[in-house]
């Protein structure tokens, strides 16, 4: 699926790093790996497999494609970038880690102060070219496991539609995300189960 998807959750950690050179350095965990998300749109949960972010970062480097740090998913609000070496991305045990040394723009100064004050504290990221598989878990919940993706950008977001109780899916139709019958999922059974959940 080539349409851009976004995910957003309350940051596990986003912080300004104290340093003696008066640089504006921030770092944090953008998203966890290997764990179920909260329920997305009331329909499914999602797991990003180990190695997905590592391969996505390497693919960007191999194809000379930049990954930007943005504010609120707006390409006009550039904060840092991987190719300029102002943005570092790495998959770690706890998830996708980022560190940025922000150039001295007014936007970055404002964002940095908001981060220091714990007012700006949420990450989001955009991705596409998803390879996934679908299954039911023991609670009859649909689980989407992502095994490949193309990482488009990382964003700091001022107001997330969801916090750590839910992961956000937007900018795509739900029908574009949910599995089709050719993926081996019984959609009639899924629709029936969804109807039963709504009656509970």
Image (tube, rainbow, N blue to C red):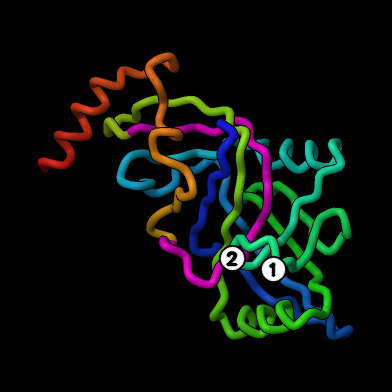
Q: Residue 56 appears at what percent x and percent y?
A: 72, 39
What number of labels is visible? Answer: 2
Tell me residue 130's x, y (percent): 58, 33
Q: Which residue position is annotated with label 2?
A: 72
Is 193 placed above or below 11 here?
above
Above or below 133: residue 47: below
Relative horizontal placement of residue 60, taking residue 161 as reference (left or right): right
Q: Is residue 144 magenta?
A: yes
Q: Are marks 1 and 2 in contact (CB under 8 Å)?
A: yes
Left or right of 74 in this view: 181: left
Which mark, by number, is residue 97?
A: none
Give me the C-alpha separation between circle 1 and circle 2. 8 Å
**Which residue is the extreme one toward the left?**
199
- Helix, strand or loop at disc 2? loop
Residue at image position (82%, 80%) is 104
At label 1, counting other C-alpha atoms closer than 10 Å, the crowd grade (few under 14, some 14-19, many 20 or more) is some
Question: Which residue sits at x=40%, y=31%?
Answer: 178
**Residue that mark 1 sits on:** 77
> Mark 1 or mark 2: which comes first in sequence?
2
Label 2, residues with CA under 10 Å away: few <14, some 14-19, many ≥20: some
Spot occupied by residue 73 in the image (x, y as percentages of width and height): 61, 60
**Residue at 55% of width from left, 64% of height from top?**
11
Front-most of residues 161 and 134: 161
Whether the magenta-drawn stretch holds residue 87 is answered as no
Q: Is residue 62 left or right of residue 190?
A: right
Classify the position of the C terminus by image quarter. Answer: top left
The residue segment tinted magenta is 142-163
The structure residue drawn at horizontal position 47% and vertical position 43%, both measured from the top left corner, is 172
Per the image, label 1 sits on a secondary structure element best described as strand
């Amino acid at each position: 699926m080539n349409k851009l998807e976004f995910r957003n959750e309350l940051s596990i950690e986003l912080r300004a790093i104290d340093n003696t050179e008066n640089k504006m350095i921030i770092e944090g965990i953008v998203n966890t790996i290997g764990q179920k998300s909260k329920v997305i749109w009331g329909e499914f949960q999602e797991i990003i497999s180990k190695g997905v972010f590592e391969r996505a970062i390497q693919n960007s480097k191999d194809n000379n494609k930049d990954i930007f740090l943005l504010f609120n998913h707006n390409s006009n609000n550039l904060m840092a970038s991987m190719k300029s070496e102002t943005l570092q991305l790495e998959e770690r045990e706890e998830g996708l880690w980022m560190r940025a040394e922000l150039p001295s723009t007014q936007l970055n100064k404002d964002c940095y102060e908001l981060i220091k004050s714990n007012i700006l504290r949420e990450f989001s990221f955009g991705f596409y070219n998803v390879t996934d598989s679908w299954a039911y878990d023991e609670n009859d919940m649909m689980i989407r496991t992502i095994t490949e993706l193309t990482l488009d950008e990382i964003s700091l977001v001022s107001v997330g539609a969801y916090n750590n109780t839910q992961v956000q899916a937007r900018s795509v139709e739900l029908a574009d995300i949910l599995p089709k019958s050719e993926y081996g999922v019984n959609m009639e059974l899924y629709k029936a189960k969804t109807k039963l959940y709504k009656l509970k």
